[in-house]
């Protein structure tokens, strides 16, 4: 299946044009951390659904401890509760700086288990090819893998998974109905839910307190400059330099993760 994944960074999307362009599945960013909801999430969901496009939802994981994962999982499921989903709920695991391999796997496993408990649905994992090969352990293989790897004819499956359920093959795609670049994907039937029934949530909100982060994470895209990113988020360039401990602010690259105050 030809697919795309979108978030606020695509701005307004003409999903009717997207459908006519041959897109068969749209993954939409729903949430991040313990309290952020993508500003365009509900609009993207409504417009994609009205255009007759199958949809799936993903959450950008930021937890730094197992204790935080319950709140993130609850926030994700609460955000998408009551909405039709045609594809698996997905954990987007990119923000792992400063964590050991063991910590990443404990956190990821706890989050995925909590999502499944709250939603009653088996989730999937989105990860870059390097992280899938070098970081993610065998305890996560039960969850389908959506792998990101660019400039190759097919994904490099030198990891513990036998197959991939999704392959993000570029972040520089072009699709009618979207201004600028968009992530392009190929999905297999493994990414699909058996039923498109609306998501129902079970369980109670975790009672423990969550450490409040003073920054969010942004994945740099081609064409970004530190100045344009600062303008987009309404922060000073110097604040970005200091928070990210940048020795040369001119040396940024597509795919790099940047902390935003």
Image (cartoon, helix red, strand yellow):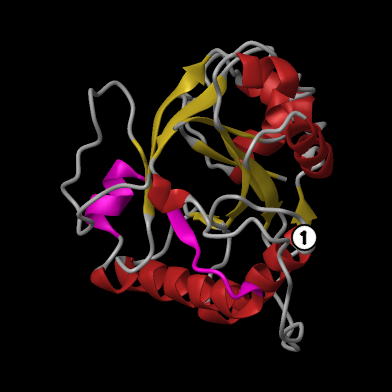
- Examine the rendered structure and indicate whether residue 114 appears above or below residue 101: below
- Judge the density around disc 1: few (<14), some (14-19), many (≥20) Cα neighbours within 10 Å: many
x and y percentages locating residue 32 in the rendered image = 67, 54
Q: Is residue 44 left or right of residue 29?
A: right
- The residue segment tinted magenta is 119-135
Quarter of the picture containing the N terminus is top left
Residue nearer the viewer, 97 or 13:
13
Residue for point 72% across, 53% down: 84
Image quarter where the C terminus lies is: top right
Q: Nearer the viewer, residue 259 or 85?
A: 85
Q: Nearer the viewer, residue 157 or 100?
A: 157
User: Residue lying farthest left?
Assistant: 158
Nearer-the-camera pick, 248 or 234: 234
**Vertical placement of 93 versus 103: above or below?**
above
Where is residue 113? Give x, y as percent: 50, 77
Q: In the image, residue 115 lies at what x, y percent?
A: 58, 72
Image position, residue 69 (x, y; %): 58, 74
| Quadrant of the image occupied by residue 83 | bottom right
Q: Is residue 174 left or right of residue 28?
A: left
Position of residue 128 relative to residue 234, above or below, is below
Secondary structure of residue under mark 1 = helix
190 vs 249: above or below: below
In the picture of the structure, the residue carrying the numbered disc 1 is 79
Please tell me which residue is depicted at 27% across the width and 67% down the height of the picture.
137
* Residue 83 shows in this picture: yes
């Amino acid at each position: 299946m030809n697919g795309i994944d979108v978030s606020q960074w695509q701005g307004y999307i003409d999903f009717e044009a997207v459908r006519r362009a041959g897109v068969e599945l749209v993954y939409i960013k729903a949430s991040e951390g313990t309290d952020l909801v993508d500003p365009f999430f509900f609009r993207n969901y409504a417009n994609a659904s009205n255009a007759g496009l199958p949809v799936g939802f993903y959450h950008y994981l930021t937890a730094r401890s197992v204790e935080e994962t319950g709140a993130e999982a609850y926030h994700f499921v609460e955000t998408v509760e009551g909405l039709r989903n045609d594809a698996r709920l997905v954990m987007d695991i990119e923000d792992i700086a400063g964590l050991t391999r063991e910590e990443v796997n404990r956190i990821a496993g706890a989050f995925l288990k909590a999502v499944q408990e709250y939603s009653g649905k088996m989730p999937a994992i989105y990860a870059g090819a390097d992280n899938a090969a070098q970081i993610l352990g065998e305890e996560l293989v039960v969850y389908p893998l959506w792998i990101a790897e660019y400039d190759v004819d097919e994904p490099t499956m030198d990891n513990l998974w036998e197959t991939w359920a999704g392959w993000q093959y570029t972040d520089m795609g072009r699709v009618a109905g979207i201004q600028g670049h968009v992530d392009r994907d190929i999905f297999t039937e493994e990414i699909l839910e058996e039923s498109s029934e609306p998501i129902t949530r079970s369980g109670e909100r975790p009672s423990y307190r969550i450490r409040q982060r003073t920054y969010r994470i942004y994945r740099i895209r081609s064409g970004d400059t530190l100045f344009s990113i600062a303008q987009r988020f309404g922060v000073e360039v110097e604040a970005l330099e200091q928070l990210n401990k940048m020795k040369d602010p001119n040396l940024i690259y597509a795919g790099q993760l940047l902390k935003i105050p």
